[in-house]
Image (cartoon, grey):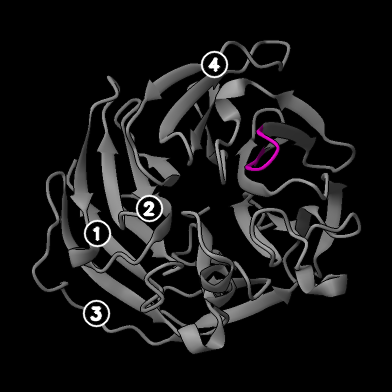
Amino acid sequence: MFKKLSKTAAAAAVLSAIVLPTIGPAPASAVSAPLSNARTALHFDLSKDQTPENIALAPDGSAYVTFAKARQIARISPGGTVHTLATLPLPAGGGLHTPALNFPLTSGIVRTHDGTLYFLYATGTADLTGVWRLRPGGTPRRIAALPPAGLPNGLALDPRTGTLYVTDSVLGTIWSVPVTGGAPTAWSTAPELAATGFLGANGLKVHGGALWATNLDKGTVLRIPIGRDGRGGPVRTTATGLTGIDDFAFTGRGDQILAALNGPSEVALIQPDGSHSTVLTGADGLQNPTSIALRGNTVYVGSAAYVTDKDPNLVLARLNR
């Protein structure tokens, strides 16, 4: 999720349609190794309330995104066209009671091998907040209710066990939910997940027998081992000093990470020892980046322009392995 906003700025941050891309290198590029060839591949239309919050990639070259305040799930084709797959119902009261944000939020998304999408919706209401599922050609359905006092944000799938994991940025909790749905379990409530003023636990990935999470307020990356019994082990902080850290992705080089730093409009490369460097900046087109995904050597960075309020977009770059 994103850097702390005023209510006015937060209310202005949204989207729901795509403008065909202008492809080419960003001027005065600040890209640095191991990334190259950064370019803005898609410009989203702020006037139509499009803010890409999270992204899941498919083998056919398409991408599935959540549009945060537009309450939409959409597919972006390899050629850059968009098709809205679903618009979620507007909660009673318009979502003004959504914790921390005061607008309904469509956030984390994952895709399974059969094309089923799982995603999160937070409204501050008990009837809508939770984990949702969208099967190919179907309609969205909530499969697990989550506390309306929380803000479900990051979503990860462990395909080995068929378990979905959810970060709650307000309640400082990681929930677990079977892909079949049902009652959630508070998998971890470790203090390292807690917020210190705005949003705590945020991005989430399953990697190397552990859950990895970020904490936006604390600027940290956390590793929590998944035990043989499925329970969480002791939390280890693997990196600090990452202002506004949001979503992230592993590069394929062990525990090396690319992370979106929302407030500074940067992407950081985080080494396994916790050291980090800046590899993309606003000069490469970033506008409050929220999400990162990798397909082969291509890095996808979604920017929502929550604070800049200028150019929500999708930046692509090459990862030089």
Pick whichever of labels 4 and 3 is earlier in the sequence: 3
Q: Is residue 197 left or right of residue 30?
A: right
Q: Is residue 176 visible?
A: yes
Marks 1 and 3, how far apart in space? 12 Å
| Mark 4 secondary-structure assignment | loop
Q: Residue at x 64, y 35 (%)?
A: 159
**Magenta-colored span:** 167-172
Q: Which mark is residue 276?
A: none
**What's the CA distance linking mark 2 and mark 4?**
29 Å
Residue 162 visible (yes or no): no
234 lies above or below 56: above
Front residue of 134/54: it is 54
The magenta stretch spans residue 169: yes
In the rendered structure, the answer to whether residue 64 lies left or right of residue 101 reads left
Q: In whole angstroms, how far apart are the C-alphas of marks 1 and 4?
A: 32 Å
Q: Position of residue 219 (x, y in %)?
A: 41, 36
Label 2: which residue?
Answer: 295
State if disc 3 and disc 4 touch (CB < 8 Å).
no
User: Which residue lies under the disc numbered 1?
Assistant: 317
Estimate the x, y position of residue 24 in percent, counting from the top left: 18, 77
- Give the residue at x 85% y 50%: 143
Instruction: Give the residue pinned by disc 3.
Output: 23
